[in-house]
Image: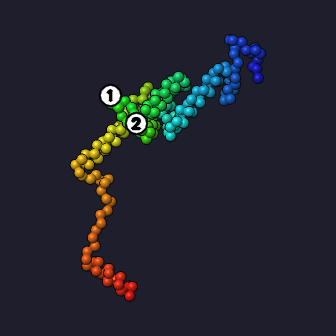
Amino acid sequence: MRKPGRPAHPTAANAMRIVCPCCQGDFPIEAGINDVAARNAVKLAFGLTPFGDLMLGYVQLFKPANRAMPIARLVKILEELLGMIKQGHINRSGRTWAAPMDAWKSAFEEMLERRDKLTLPLKNHSYLLTIIAGFADKTEGIQEKQQEARKQGGETKRDEPKSKAVRMPQEVKAQLNEFLNKTTS
């Protein structure tokens, strides 16, 4: 429905406009197309990983307090994240660290748990990458200890049997046999 005062036919200055289903305001159709494309891109990006909901929460940590996040900023953040996630490793403190999916998931969870202690909005991924590097460092440490134990011929606690067989003393064995013989006769 045309609002009063609007021309019936759009001109170059006044292009076709559509109505927002949420606020009922009108806006140029070009903005609507861009918005749909942006929504689809975001939906696609968050659906690429098994932790899309966590990534969405993390991205919101970059949102300025009293205004909306510009779509260009959102796209940039997503491109950075998805690039690192796809690579499976990160570069931090002059070193390359393994960054499997589990590490990303755990790092996003930790960031969201500490939300109240962070200085928001976030400016970069430094803290997230520090968490992932910490996970990788712990994993490497465990692997190094296991390799050293194998080199020295020792067993790691994980390799030890959970229970050792205990020999039954002869006298107990004889009493058991005597009891069994009495019950079967």
Q: Secondary structure at mark 1?
A: loop
- Tell me which label, 2 or 1, sits earlier in the chain: 1
What residue type is disc 2 on?
Answer: Ala
In percent of width and height, residue 142 lies at 31, 44
Identity of the residue drawn at 44% across and 39% down: 101
Q: Which residue is mark 2?
A: 99
Q: Is residue 133 above or below residue 152?
A: above
Task: State whether residue 147 appears in this view.
Answer: yes
Residue 139: name its quadrant.
top left
Horizontally, residue 76 falls left or right of residue 130, namely right
Q: Secondary structure at mark 2?
A: loop
Mark 1 neighbour class, 10 Å CA radius: few under 14, some 14 to 19, many 20 or more: few
Looking at this view, is 97 or 122 the one in front?
97
Q: Quadrant of the C terminus?
A: bottom left
In percent of width and height, residue 28 lies at 67, 19
Identity of the residue drawn at 32% across and 40% down: 140
Horizontally, residue 23 falls left or right of residue 48, namely right
Q: Is residue 114 above or below residue 169?
A: above
**Tag shown at residue 104:** none
Discs 2, 1 touching: Cβ within 8 Å: no
Looking at this view, is 154 or 1 the one in front?
154
Task: State whether residue 109 appears in this view.
Answer: no
What residue type is disc 1 on?
Answer: Gly
Horizontally, residue 72 falls left or right of residue 6, namely left
Identity of the residue drawn at 31% across and 54% down: 159
In percent of width and height, residue 86 lies at 46, 33
Identity of the residue drawn at 70% across and 18% down: 16
Q: CA distance from mark 2 to mark 1?
A: 15 Å
Q: Which residue is mark 1?
A: 94
Q: From this viewpoint, which residue is outermost toward the bottom?
A: 185
In percent of width and height, residue 147 lies at 28, 45
Horizontally, residue 76 falls left or right of residue 93, namely right
